[in-house]
Amino acid sequence: MTQPALAPEAKHTLLQYVTGKYLLPGNCKVNFEWEDPQTVGETMTFTVKFYQRNGQPYPICDTDNLFVEVTEGARRVATLSELGGTDPSAANVAVVKFTVRHAGQYKISVIIGSCHIHGSPFVKTFLPGPPDPNKSVFVRHSSTVVCTAGIPHSLAIEPRDEFNNLCLFHSDENPTEGYNVAITQIGSPEPVLCSVTLDYEETSHHINLQVQFPSEGCFHAAVSYRGIELHNGDFDIVVLSASDAALVQKNVASKNHNICYEARLVGMQGERLSKPKKVFCYVSPKQLTVKEFLLKFIPKRLVTFRLCPSTKFHFQSSSNNNQHNHPSFIVDDGCQPKVELIAKDRNVIAATFIHFLLKNIGGSETFKDKQDFFYHEVRKYHQKHYHEKLQMKVNREKLLESSMKATKGFSVSDWCRNFEITFQGEQGLDWGGVRREWFELTCAALFDARNSLFTSFSDNKQALVHPNPQRPAHLKLKHYEFAGKLVGKCLYESALGGSYRQLVRARFTRSFLAQIIGLRVHYKYFEQDDPDLYLSKVKYILEHDVEEMELYFVEEEYDKFGQVIKVVELVQGGAKVRVQNSTKHQYLDALAQYRLANSFKDEVEHFLKGLNELIPDNLLSIFDENELELLLCGTGEYSVADFRAHHVVNGSSSEFRRILDWFWTAVANFTQEEMARLLQFTTGCSQLPPGGFAELSPRFQITAAPTFGNLPTAHTCFNQLCLPDYDSYEHFERALLLAISEGTEGFGMI
């Protein structure tokens, strides 16, 4: 609100000094409408009443430069200020609102011009809220827990509020109240007789869940708080006998990694066998291999699963297979066809696999724990390589060629040294800034689609990139090997921490990231990697009856004039295999395998050759695609001002304008990771183009959704975020945070 000020910003007149008709910060009063301390998450309101030096009310207006700042250390909280009002009696009142999400002691400064008002800055304390099941988690989580019959096994729950603050409890509270632990036998809804206890540890602020089973078996646990399941509170429990537990420990400790167990193959390639086939399961620290023996002595590998978090065991009850009395299980890595097996030693196979897996990833499946473990293992892997300075001279005008020439004879030890960069013809010492510039410029030379080594499926600057099989003749496979080494160098520098941390400035396709960690690509990658093809073809096939289409297992390639230059069979004899409704997913997966993987297979292999010289492939495979992008590229640096200057709004109602105000307040409070997840949720990538939000194509769109109280949704093909209506800021912020944290995992986006 703008009102005529009694005291303009110019110097006060003599009459104003004599009569006291000017704003005096020392006379202003603040009224906090809450008692200290308060719980985080509530919208806090306080009023400021402004007075002249003569004690009369002062009608506050925009030109008086009221500034309100709420801070805790380097953290700043966005505020909403409403000046005056329609009621003349409130003309000297400003109402300030803000929401604190992080517990701590905050400083509230109220400043007019350059002067604090009376009592400013004020200090207020905000405490964590009650436990939130969506944020409370098991510490060092594993999707399958292994324990021994008759021996208590402890798991730690970290109670956190909805804003991820570690919860604190008063002496008169019972921290374990509200938790429920439901344990059932696999394949049965009936509860299992076992001992379950919950205790609170004051030193760690953790809740200790202790379980003890009287006998061996395979069980499923669901842990909830006040009726809502914890974020990672759904897991399986494999209970071993004492003898089997000793055998598993022997397997894990053994240097002989030729551990195998007899099993029966029941199903493979999506089909059940008419008669179960005798096979052997080999478990090693790197893989699980299923083999059969021809003529009883010639081994034939049927399938191999990498030992990584994406490979899952799905346990089944023995009743599912009437002709056998042994338990069954399915092995699925999300890429290859599932394999169903029956084995007397199922629990030993699974427990050995899980122990190897947890050993490989540091004992936990959360991203932060895996990242810490990854950095530790990279430092350990290169502990004999010293990070001594290594002079390197490059030509800025021919950066890529001169950098490749300078590093041509480098050993792994040389790549692990601290590059001290000098640009030819330029003076100046490299104290880190020149090195960082070299990394950034070299990444641009390698990964910018305009330089043709990597390319995208569309021409806009936002498009994600992958290796270019149609690259110019002067760009060779050795360039991809150099690119892999540079990415490995960035990861190694980041593992050293501190000022050495180096991010990869690139926007890779999800399918390329998947291939880096050894995953097989599938059709769902098209939505983010090639949105034009997804909208024009993939989505259409998914939503329509293909029986009416003349569609075969082939892919046609066209030149720039629209003429067919090549027809590729996606399966053997694909030109004669018509796509049916029952096989359209298989067709789309084959199409993805060709367009997103096979067409630039050699380029990927050379990239991995360079990368794996510095970073072992088994360390990279502990991450999924989204986690790998965050590991390589970080969360980036995001400017809210840049965001506000370059976006499109679809909706003009007064209700939606209110939602928009709330959106910008929430975004102003976002951490860098939350901004990355908002981008990942809306655009499909956590990284912005080099020019920031201005270069997003299409622009970031904020659209009114015709619903009330639902979670926000996104259309990544259009960079569109759809915001429903809400009855309060608290509900809006909670829904937005939940949507961006859950929607970025897998392909949950609309």
Image (cartoon, rainbow, N blue to C red):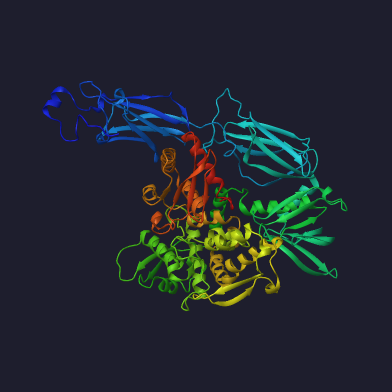
Question: Toward the viewer: 622 or 69?
Answer: 69
Residue 706 in picture, x, y percent from top left: 51, 42
Vertical position of residue 529 compared to residue 675: above or below:
below
Q: Name the residue: 53% across, 60% down.
A: 531
Question: Toward the viewer: 204 or 235?
Answer: 235
Question: Toward the viewer: 542 or 299?
Answer: 542
Q: Is residue 100 left or right of residue 331?
A: left
Residue 142 visible, this orientation: yes
Residue 437 in picture, x, y percent from top left: 38, 62
Residue 590 in picture, x, y percent from top left: 65, 66
Residue 448 occupies quadrant:
bottom left
Q: Name the residue: 68% across, 58% down.
A: 285
Q: Quadrant of the N terminus?
A: top left
Query: From this viewpoint, which residue is outermost toward the left?
Result: 14
Looking at the image, how many numbered discs can be counted on the residues? 0
Residue 139 in picture, x, y percent from top left: 61, 42
Residue 249 visible, this orientation: no
Vertical position of residue 678 compared to residue 621: above or below:
above
Vertical position of residue 306 compared to residue 327: above or below:
below
Question: Toward the viewer: 188 or 355?
Answer: 188
